[in-house]
Amino acid sequence: MSTDIISFVVVLGILIFVHEFGHFIVAKLVGVGVEKFSLGFGPKIVGKKIGMTEYLISAIPLGGYIKMVGESPNAEISEDEKEISFSEKSVGRRMLIVAAGPVFNLVLAILIFFAFFSTSGVPVLLPEIGTIQEGRPAEKAGLQPNDLIASINGAPVESWEDMADLIKESEGAPLGLEVHREKEIVYLDILPEIAPSQNLFGEEINRYVVGVTPSGRVMVKDLNLFQAFGESLFRTWEISRLTFLSIAKMIQGKVSAKTIGGPIMIAQMAGQQAKAGAASLIFFVAFLSIQLGLLNLLPIPVLDGGHLAFFLVEVITRRPVSAKIREHAQRAGVFLLGLMMTYVIYNDLMRIFAE
């Protein structure tokens, strides 16, 4: 449990710092004064004022905030402060400041992936046969355990994913396989068959298969700097795409909301990743950083996405959203987030009691 708590505090602290630092540094760059920079909410534990900014560590480690001069539309500011007031800046600059937090979280993930891939390469699951299902096309074609698939219909196969994609794209057409078996090369013809399966979200689908499982052997593929950067962008994009797809499927009712986890689950997972090793924990930080960045972009008042939505309305209508509307929206946003937090903590507790 102590490992879970320590890992949770470290992971969340890194993510919150990066997020708020994004807001902070861009605010400074566009000339907005920052009065407070806090890690955590609630009562101050410790703080130090440097220049006009007070840097704080607060009691509740579930978020953070920066307080800018003139951040509230109704804030009273002196003539001297107008030049550094958030509300006095153009809508474009205000949007940059608000968007910077989520963007910095995405950049953190890219940098973590890049550092890992450029130094350690990328692990690739080899297209080597592990087990063969009885009566399936692979057995009928003569495939054997430990066979390495080198090409399919002349297309080179470097990974298990390559092989699975080519089988899927065949739509049941015959495939010509080049197989490396010990010291010989064997050529086999195989006819994929359609079979019921489940996708990543547990939905029932039909897909073309040949009836094999991987051996589990992995090769590390070295990448140059450009390849490592490209792979980092791809991994960040893929996690982002799946995150939005998951949210859409939850709204459609195709994925259970019970899969959502809260701070307790994050603490447990952080502890597990820490025990698995530094690399696993670092990858977990990258994954959560993407999640935090994207969830903050949702158009919910009090989140960054909600503020961006207000600014977008301002761009279209050429006038700010009224303070009254913003106030009501903020209250609704706080209520909605409170409900969401209650629900995810309830899910966490149900998982614990079910174990």
Image (cartoon, helix red, strand yellow):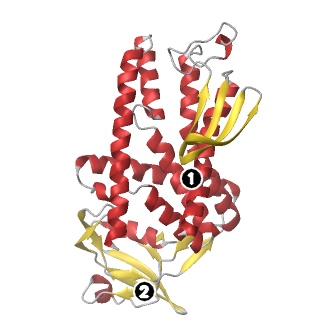
Quarter of the image where one finds residue 350: bottom left
**Is 97 situated above or below 260?**
above
Question: With respect to residue 58, does 166 lie above or below?
Answer: below
The residue to which callout 1 is attached is 12
Residue depicted at 31% across the width and 78% down the height? 210
Residue 227 appearing in the image = no
Circle 1 packing at 10 Å, graded few (<14), some (14-19), many (20+), is many
Residue 163 in sight here = yes
Please state if 291 lies on the left or on the right of 79 as rendered. Answer: left
Label 2 secondary element: strand
Residue drawn where x is 35% and y is 46% of the image: 340
Q: Amino acid at mark 2?
A: Gly
Please state which amino acid type lies under the numbered disc 1: Leu
Name the quadrant containing residue 275.
bottom right
Q: Give 132 or 319, whichever is nearer the viewer.
A: 319
Residue 78, x across and y down, in percent: 65, 9
Q: Nearer the viewer, residue 109 or 80?
A: 80
161 is higher (above) or lower (below) than 183:
above
Q: Residues within 10 Å of mark 2 (few under 14, many from 20)?
A: some
Chain-order first, disc 1 or disc 2: 1
Report the Cα–Cα distance between label 1 and label 2: 39 Å
Q: Which of the two residues, 113 or 353, is positioned nearer the viewer here?
A: 353
Picture coordinates of residue 319 (x, y %)?
44, 10
- Say the numbered circle drawn on residue 200: none
Q: Which residue is disc 2 drawn over?
A: 130
Question: Percent from the top left, x then y, of residue 267?
Answer: 50, 61
Q: Name the residue at 38% across, 16% down.
A: 324
Residue, far top: 79
Residue drawn 28% across and 75% down? 192
Q: Quadrant of the C terminus?
A: bottom left
Residue 283 in the image: state x and y as whole percent: 57, 61
